[in-house]
Amino acid sequence: KFIKLVSAGKIKDFSLKSFPFEKEIDKDGVITDVISANQSILVQVVKEPISTKGPRISSELSLAGRFIVLVPFSDRVSISQKIESKEEKDRLKRLVQSIRPKGFGVIVRTVAEGKKVAELDKDLQNLLSRWTAMCKKLPTAHHPSKVLGELNRASSILRDVFNDTFTGIHIDDEELYNETKDYLQEIAPSKQSIVKFYQSNDTPIFEKYNIERQIKTSFGKTVSMSKGAYLIIEHTEALHVIDVNSGNRSNKATNQEDTALEVNMIAAAEVARQLRLRDMGGIIVVDFIDMSNPENRKTLYEFLRDEMSDDKAKHKILPPSKFGLVQITRQRVRPEVNIKTREEDPNNENGEIEAPILIVDKISSDIERILKVHKKIVLNAHPFVAAYLTKGFPSLRSKWFFEYKKWVKIIPRDAYTFLE
């Protein structure tokens, strides 16, 4: 009703303080009793289209800020369940009740913990300004059209993760640089100076800060971990599957059970990181290495829960089965991040190879493992790879010698394919 009156230009005050609320719609009723064909309604996209599924929309609107979420046509004040202190919850609820305008509900986010009323009020006024700006567009809006958009991706990330520990934000795009500075001026004026514009004719920003290597390492089908262990991540229509492998590592643990627990703990930390990094949602099944000791399974379960505790997406973790399977459900609002990490094979027009940037990491990991049990090692490699490992000062081979006190013999092989 409010939206209809605003669209018709009959309401100029968008504050909701004098607008009478309608009674709740019967959620089990018939949709045609509430809306009709060709009727204009205001909706919010709450879930992006994923695969063959279209977007999910809702007429229950909300505007997310840094510390609070503003909910029009509501009078409730809710506090994040992740704030554990009852005294802090009561304090925040009391502060928000004192500044909350009539007709708007408020959800207090976890990052609001310890904040002063002035900071909360500034965030609230910013959201009210966005609400007013949206309402002003409605009389001239034609369906379908966007009347309010989310912050750009960079600003929305800063809104959710920015804190006082940030010491530098480096950006190589001038437009994004200016937008980020403007946004920080709103949420943390004292930190605006940490935004730096990166300019270089020689070195791209990803190469300068070693991000290219991290992307290639983190988004492939195979994810390497310490101790020679690795994950294999597969995506299907129904679920995501993560397989934990110990690799061909030496077993210095007292028994196989200790080895399994050690690798599983390393994998649990990496699984939690990968879920956030790729924004994987839906059903995730993790195949950990089998452990027969129930205490070890309990230890793994509790460790995984701790590692996932900082995940902002809603999730649920089931204890490991006797076969080592752990089921995780994680909120999915957009498709998972999928970055191509393999590159064209120079020897095969239609083939693909592992990114060359990763080959040194893989060789270094294998050498570390082998030199723990063998005194000598001979490495046969394509001439390009052999030259890369032996040229320069200090060369990679020299670095290995200083670290392991053992010399690696490298033999170029013309018969080898690139990266073999």
Image: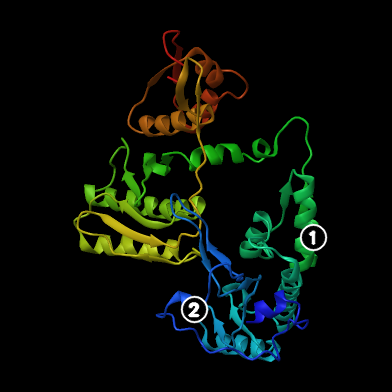
Front in this rendered view, residue 380 or 29: 29
Front in this rendered view, residue 177 or 55: 55
The quadrant the C terminus occupies is top left
| Coordinates of residue 394 in the picture (x, y in percent) | 60, 25
Neighbor class of circle 1 (other Cα within 10 Å; few <14, some 14-19, many 20+) is some
Residue occupying image coordinates x 19% and y 58%: 322
Front in this rendered view, residue 15 or 322: 15
Disc 2 secondary structure class = loop
The residue type indicated by label 1 comes to Asp
Earlier along the polypeptide chain: callout 1 or callout 2? 2
Q: Is residue 217 left or right of residue 303?
A: right
- To which quarter of the image does residue 186 belong? bottom right
Identify whether 348 is placed above or below 151.
Answer: above
- Which residue is denoted by mark 1 in the rendering? 182
Residue occupying image coordinates x 78% and y 48%: 175
- To which quarter of the image does residue 202 belong? top right
Could you tell me how many numbered marks the image carries?
A: 2
Disc 1 secondary structure class = helix
Residue 234: assigned label: none
Neighbor class of circle 2 (other Cα within 10 Å; few <14, some 14-19, many 20+) is few
| Coordinates of residue 160 in the picture (x, y in percent) | 61, 64
Identify whether 95 is placed above or below 3.
Answer: below
- Which residue is denoted by mark 2 in the rendering? 81
| Coordinates of residue 297 in the picture (x, y in percent) | 26, 60
The quadrant the N terminus occupies is bottom right
